[in-house]
Image (tube, helix red, strand yellow):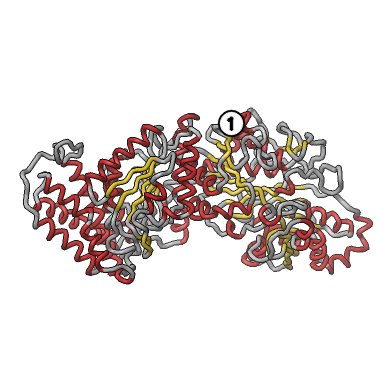
Amino acid sequence: MTDQATDLDEQFRIEISALTPRPERPTSQPIEPGSTITGATCLELFAAQATSRHLDLAARRLGSSRRGYYSIGSSGHEGNAALAAALRTTDPALLHYRSGAFFAHRARNVPNLDPIRDVLLGVVAAAADPISGGRHKVFGSAAANIIPQTSTIASHLPRAVGLAFAVDRAARLGVPAPWPSDSVVLCSFGDASANHSTATGAINTAVHTAHQGIPMPILFVCEDNGIGISVPTPPDWIEQAYGHRPGLAYFSADGCDPRDALTTAATAAEWVRDRREPAFLRLQTVRLLGHAGSDVEAAYRRPADIAADVLRDPVLATARLLVASGAATPAEVVERYDDLGRQVDAMAEKVWCAPKLTSTAAVTAPIGPLRPALVRADVLRIAALSGNGQSATADTGRVRPPVTATTHGVPHPATPGDPTTLAQSINLTLTDLLTRDQDVLVFGEDVGRKGGVYGVTKGLQKRFGARRVFDTLLDEQSVLGTALGAGLAGFVPIPEIQYLAYLHNAADQVRGEAATLSFFSDGRYRNPMVVRIAGYAYQKGFGGHFHNDNSIAALRDIPGLVLASPSRADDAAAMLRTCVSAARVDGRVCLFLEPIALYHTRDLYRPGDDGWLAPARPAQHVEIGRARVYGDGADLTLVSFANGVPMCLRVAHRLAERGINARVLDLRWLAPLPVDDLVRHARATGRVLVADETRRSGGVSEAVCTALIDAGFAGRVARVASEDSFVPLGPAADTVLLDESAIETAAGELLADVDCAHRRHAGARGSREFDSTEE
């Protein structure tokens, strides 16, 4: 233990031992006349605070002896135990990382939970840690309704807002939720985090939502210790920033004064519970022992400032109150403190050598569990509810009857079995999902009244109502935060991000929140969601780089993320159903990338052939990680996805006229890649050309080529891709995007020997259309 920690520990005993005992009073009585706080309440508060303090001290000892690992202490923030006292154990809590006392207080009131053991198992990264399974030291417990958060900078606030929204929405729609309908969502964070754009956006969303009369029962708690790592926060800043905002009730309490903390926390919690509106509580705290175990506070703080914080130690303050009120003698307080210390020390000695995670399989077990049989059964269940007896295997034959007409690019409703465009197919599938499953919500920017920028959600709000299909703020973090909270509350949310480039405004809500929750909770909490994203390029003359974006590198490396990318109507329907069922069954986080340029495409080879239309039947299903092949040519395998698929089909059609037979493999799933299908079809021809509309650097083709190398593919491989450039406006886009000419040229170079051998047979073979078969 450092000298500073030793001094803090010893000072407690010295200060309390020097106090004069007061006449003893029953702990059931108020601590002072007129107070609603009893001695018993203060004793419970002190036990939680002292437990948290000793856990901090033990974590430092374990770390210095190399038996424990990095963790951030809660010393000086023990006043947050008052929040646990003010709330019910059934109220969901998303906590600041200095919430040891809150955790100890709530856990003590939940049967069969031992906060000392649980926290220390996390400190030593033991596989038996009941929340993260040894993956990270977090405060979390499914039994205590504490949703684990890592050391985030306000990234959990959008999720908390979404959860507050979803708790009420679940009650109104009759969707079973883990929490009572009158719950209060607690979200705590630090004063430095309060300045982060994620925090300001989330709080704005809460106020905006409540302003419209929509219940928003959330209590934001800023634990203001006056410093963010080494950067001071002005003493009056939090009040100036949040204390006078219309629509946000503001409370302030001294977290180093147990009376003020208990009284104000109870008032704020009751206010939110009764009014179902957001409130903001500034809980003034101090930070003791530095930012974290490795932090040397003296390097950037004056000794006088550090000493002033020590004098405000909240554990000392509660101990003094116990003695002053007659609830305990100084000796009893010190004995209680030391007894908790002995419990912590004994447990630390017991758990430090507990087994750790030792295999890749054990570490990655919570990342995207795959239960394809159950996912398929969920799709079939939906089909059965519709009374449709068709097989759950997608119809992949090429169909070319007339399609329902469109007006101004917006799809008119079609019916199951009709040939449809990609946009109509998605609209039909969303309609079917909303009809059959009450847990499905569809929302995003412009998806309600307008029906989406491209009309994909047209008519859904009118049919299903604004409680299930609704517009959001123009803030991608809030859109995804709503989905994160709704998934926790029992829904399968289907949010829409208007354009792929806009997702990057909020990528950490996918990477740092959605993708990590199951990992850091060992699967006890999940983020089921299907995020629809309009993306890619090839919108002729429209948009520039924000509306024509082909960058998905930041998505493909997120562990456990499902990245679906359909190119045709029947695949879109089948894959969307699969994603929704995977979210419901396995808690998967799915991103559904929809190629804008193909939304209303009808033709494939020639104008009027309707060759890119297909039916969106209710029972379609495509297993995650399975590709689709068009044709059975033995000379070349063209590998592509999204806009590249019809381009490759047209190139294959022209190659066939030269007597060269190619098959086209539509990857469909960009994560996980359909490696088995890829390798099988590569080996069938011995030659592979990857046509990648994303960028050459960081594009999909890199992963495809690597997968072939890893599988020991001995044939020839080449790739063509779009340039490492943003997509410009107008005709200039053609200079940087993959096109059919580049694909055909590369195919010719790869097949030079085949072309020579087959050229004389081209007339005999003739040309043929490319039918598709499902793998």
Viewer-closest of 616 and 396:
616
Viewer-closest of 91 and 670:
91
Total numbered badges shown on the rendered structure: 1
Viewer-closest of 461 and 108:
461
In the rendered image, residue 290, in percent from the top left (x then y), is placed at: 31, 64
In the rendered image, residue 201, in percent from the top left (x then y), is placed at: 49, 48
Q: Residue furthest bottom?
A: 299
Where the N terminus falls, by quadrant? bottom left
Q: Can residue 130 be seen in this view?
A: no
- In the image, taking residue 692 as reference, residue 518 lies left or right, namely left
* Residue drawn at (72%, 67%) of the image: 717
* Residue drawn at (29%, 63%) of the image: 353
Q: In this view, does 34 lie above or below 361?
A: above
Viewer-closest of 125 and 450:
450
Q: Which amino acid does label 1 sit on?
A: Arg
* Residue drawn at (93%, 56%) of the image: 764
In the rendered image, residue 695, in percent from the top left (x then y), is placed at: 68, 62
- In the image, taking residue 479 as reference, residue 155 lies left or right, namely left
Pointer 1 local density, CA inside 10 Å: few below 14, some 14–19, many at least 20: some
Quarter of the figure with residue 279? top left
In the rendered image, residue 640, in percent from the top left (x then y), is placed at: 72, 56
Q: In this view, does 127 lie above or below 578?
A: below
Q: Is residue 195 visible?
A: yes
Mark 1 residue element = helix
The residue that disc 1 covers is: 436
